[in-house]
Amino acid sequence: MSLQLFHRHRSPGHRTSRRVDTLAVSSYDVLREVIAMAGVPTPGLDLIKTFEGLSLQAYPDPKTGNLPITIGWGSTRNKHGQPFKLGDRITREEADELLMMQVANTYLPPQRRIPGWDSLNANQQGAILSFAYNLGANFYGASGFETISRVLRNQDWRNLEAAIILYRNPGTNVEEGLLRRRLSEANVFLAGTTGVPLSAAGQRYLAGGRTSVPGSRLSREAQAYLANRPTGGGSGGDSGGGSGSGGLATPGSRLLTLTNPLTSGEDVRAVQQALVRWGANVTADGLFGPATRQAGEQ
């Protein structure tokens, strides 16, 4: 993309002419400036581009293997609002424009309903925008998002990390990627928050590599983080970012999910004892295994 700048020039003979300077500029940079003027937090765009990745050819959703069909920077609909189909292709410039348009028109306006939105800085708004782009523009106040909605409503930033990592689809093949995204969003958010840093466990996870564990969807580093993550009163009504979360929680406790090695502790035993009282066929051994998860989902 290029911009032509016209300058009026008066010659020594007082004859006025026009000189044209052509500047090569990135269309994305121009759009970015325009969107910034419209109030879109650019840290959110950076997070979205980092985790959505760029594909100029349409591809199926990695979780469902089918819909929604996605293209560009995670876009599922074209500029006319129509869903993409497998086989569709776009250019890099079209992908950038589509991202900007969808963020400004679809994903940002609902976030303005969050109490105190205008008092949040660009880092905080950007992290929320990335979360919304991934999990739905209207997540705030919706069923399954009680914990993060409460944290945002109360501006309870000390529990922000514990709340946001609930939404990672535990037990699915996308859990590790979503965990990394949630922690990156928390890191950006808390970087703009005085006196509330990301946990040491979270910082280690984001800074470290990934070591696969046979028979587990999660890396050794992810398991170490989840074993030492902050906890902060997650609600049992939260979906964990989607169906099939495979987690149990009670107010004031950590979210219990299947891990390798198995999560253990007195809180697990307490949940199992409650399940037994409700008629479930589980052993109160303090280990959160498949039988305990299945009993909790019934």
Image (cartoon, rainbow, N blue to C red):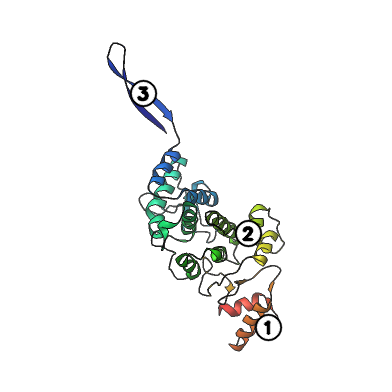
Circle 2 sits in a helix, a strand or a loop, which is it? helix
Amino acid marked by disc 2 = Gly
Give the class, few, some or many, for how many residues have Cα within 10 Å of label 3's Cα (few <14, many ≥20).
Answer: few
Amino acid under label 3?
A: Val
Q: How crowded is mark 2: few (under 14 residues within 10 Å), some or many (20 or more)?
A: many
Residue kind at label 1, given as amino acid type = Ala
Name the residue: 38% across, 57% down: 109
Query: Which disc is residue 108 wearing?
Result: none
Q: In which quarter of the image is residue 296?
A: bottom right
* C-alpha gap between disc 2 and disc 3: 53 Å
Residue 194 spot, x, y in % from top left? 54, 57
| Residue 242 x %, y % | 51, 66
For discs 2 and 1, the disc positioned in front in the rendered view? 2
Q: Compared with residue 108, is residue 154 higher up or lower down, i.e. above or below?
A: below
Q: Is the N terminus in the top left, top right, bottom left or bottom right quadrant? A: top left
Give residue 192's position: percent from left, percent from top.
52, 54
Q: Residues within 10 Å of mark 1 (few under 14, many from 20)?
A: some
Q: x and y percent of residue 130 in the render?
A: 49, 55
Of residues 247 and 162, the one nearer the viewer is 162
Task: Tell me: residue 61, above or below residue 96.
Answer: below
Q: Is residue 294 left or right of residue 29?
A: right
Q: Quadrant of residue 6?
A: top left
Q: Which mark is residue 284?
A: 1
Asked which secondary structure carries label 3, the reply is: strand
Pointer 3 residue: 20
Q: Is residue 72 above or below residue 202?
A: above
Visible residue check, residue 140: yes
Q: In this view of the protein, can residue 67 be seen by the observer?
A: no
Badge 2 is on which residue? 202
Distance CA(mark 3)–CA(mark 1): 80 Å
Q: Which of marks 2 and 3 is in front?
A: 2
